[in-house]
Structure formats: structure tokens, C-alpha cells
Amino acid sequence: MANRKAVLTCALTGVLTDPAQHGVPVTPEQMALEARRARDAGASIVHVHVRNQAPGLGRLPSWDPEDARRVCDAIRAECPELLINLSTGVVGPDISGPAACLEAVKPELAALNAGSLNYLKLRSNDEWAWPPMLFDNPVEKIEAFAKVMQANGIVPECECFDTGILRSVALFARRAMVPTPPHVSLVMGVESGMPNKASWLPLLLEEMLPGTHWQVIGIGRQEVWALHQRCAELGGDLRTGLEDTFYLPDGSKASSNGPLIDALAKVAATAGRAVASPDEARAILGLRPRG
């Protein structure tokens, strides 16, 4: 298992990063260009957050299915072999916007936030970086998303911000809410969630069902690269991109998603693992063939 090819995902842009400050992609053309850069560096999957397409509002998310369609159509036209993983993260019980985007795009994969988290961060002066918020994902909301995904042939990727959420995934699988074996992303580095500690990974693996497809989402600066290295050594798949970090292993700031994915491919190689092509990724993850 640890020697099989690694599936690389690029998280292209993120949720609220201001493009005027960090230069993240927003428009369909920019997203397609970044997807090509990621593909050329070894990514098989792109994780897509759709941004508001109105002038001056690109820092905000969009749940307009036409925006989602335009962005994903542009990516598919530029890189038809890539797999698309669509974000669904929304606060509150109303999932109509994300559900409409899933139905419009029908990506191969979609994020399924598998539990709730007090989403917190402090500044250096101990003031809140933003007003404390609850990223609410109660079971009825998770189940509603899972039903939309199942109806549209979309595989859920369960995002787990803490150990209790990870353990809940096994319960969801027992109830057939998610496939068995499930797909899991360990979100590490959020200040109020699991830390960026590579030593945690063997313990977290013990809490997964046999055969679970898993990867790490490392949030932070260059400290995330030790986490990716241990993930690669333990047989996990690998993800990075401008949503997760702006920094390369040497501490320099990445100019685009391409250098981040190139660095991730080198992490895989250091662990003795080749990088999977998109078609190989489909087979590894048990997804439908391209066609």
C-alpha cells in the first residue's frame, strides 16, 4: 500500500482569500490556467471553490450553479483528463446553493464536511482573527449532502477536522451514508482543530476503516511539508495548493499552484512513490472511468 502510486490533489484557490492580496485564481480562465499548471506538475485532481464572478467581489464565494458550471467547464476544456472535486462547505442549514452546484457540474468527487467545528484563530495580540464561528455540520445536514451526491454519482470525500469527526465517518459508513471503504481528508493545522503534527498520523490511521482512501490537508506555512512527507511514507495520498498554503518547503512564497504541486511530487518521490496519472487515480480511488 505504501508503495503504490500517490494521487495528487491541487486545491486551486480556497474560500475567502483576497485575490488582490495573494493573487489566487477567480475567473474561469484563471482557474483553468491554474488547473493546467497543477496537472503539468503531477496533479490528477483539482479541488474547486467557486468565487463570485462580479467585478470586485472575487474574494467572496459563489453558490450560483451557472458560475460553477462556467468554472468547471473551463477546467474541463483546458484539462479534460483531470478529476474535479467540488467544495460544498457552507454555514447554516440551507444547502440549496451547494446542492445546485453539484447537480450542475456532477464532479467525480465532492467535499463532505463530516462534523462541526468551532472555527477559531487568535492574532499575536490574542485578539480573535475573526469573530468566533461555528462551522455547523450536524448529521441531518451531512446526510442531506450525501443523498445529493449519491443521486448524482458523486463520491464524497469526508473532511475531518478532529478525531471525533474521523471516528464518526465509520458510523456513517455503517449506515451506508458514505461508501465503504470511505474517502477521508485529515484537515490538520486549523488552530481549533487537529494540529500539524506528523506524529499523529499513525494514531489517526488506527481510527480508519480498513481500505480507507485518505489524504492530509495541511494548513499552514512551510511546517506542513513534514506532514506531507510522513503522509507519503504511510501510504496516504497528497494534497496542497493555494487554498492550503502559500509557502514552499524552503519558506519562499509560491508564484502559483504549479510549484506547490511540483514540490508535492518530490515529496512522493522521496518516499519511493511515483505519481498517479488521472486515469490511474480513477482506478486507485474506485471512481468511474473517464468517458
Image: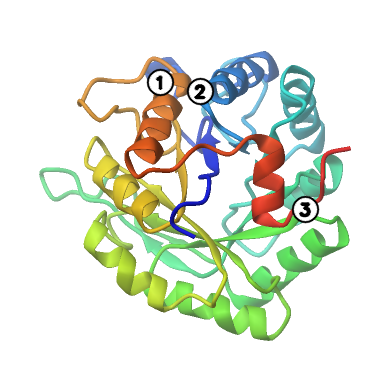
Dot label at residue 68 = none
Q: Is residue 276 visible?
A: yes
Where does label 1 land, which residue?
A: 259
First reached walking from the N terminus: tag 2 or tag 3: 2
Q: Residue 107 location, x and y as percent?
A: 76, 44
Q: CA distance from mark 2 to mark 3?
A: 31 Å
First reached walking from the N terminus: tag 3 or tag 1: 3
Most distant residue in the left direction: 125
In the image, 192 versus 151, the foreground residue is 151
Q: Residue 220 location, x and y as percent?
A: 29, 41
| Residue depicted at x 22% and y 63% | 199
| Residue depicted at x 39% and y 77% | 206
Helix, strand or loop at disc 1? Answer: helix
Q: Residue 258 location, x and y as percent?
A: 47, 20
Above or below, 46 relative to 73? below
Q: CA distance from mark 1 to mark 2?
A: 7 Å
| Residue kind at label 1, given as amino acid type | Pro
Where does label 3 land, which residue?
A: 99
Q: Is residue 56 left or right of residue 66?
A: left
Q: Quadrant of the C terminus?
A: top right
Q: Is residue 71 left or right of residue 17?
A: right
Q: Quadrant of residue 18?
A: top left
How many C-alpha atoms fall within 10 Å of the one at disc 1: few (<14), some, or many (≥20)?
some
Helix, strand or loop at disc 2? Answer: helix
Above or below, 265 relative to 200? above
- Whether residues under marks 1 and 2 lie with C-beta atoms below 8 angstroms apart, the answer is yes
Where does label 2 land, which residue?
A: 41
Which of the two marks, 1 or 2, is nearer to us in this view?
Answer: 2
Q: CA distance from mark 3 to mark 1?
A: 33 Å
| Residue kind at label 2, given as amino acid type | Ala
In the image, 10 versus 29, the foreground residue is 10
Q: Quadrant of residue 277?
A: top right
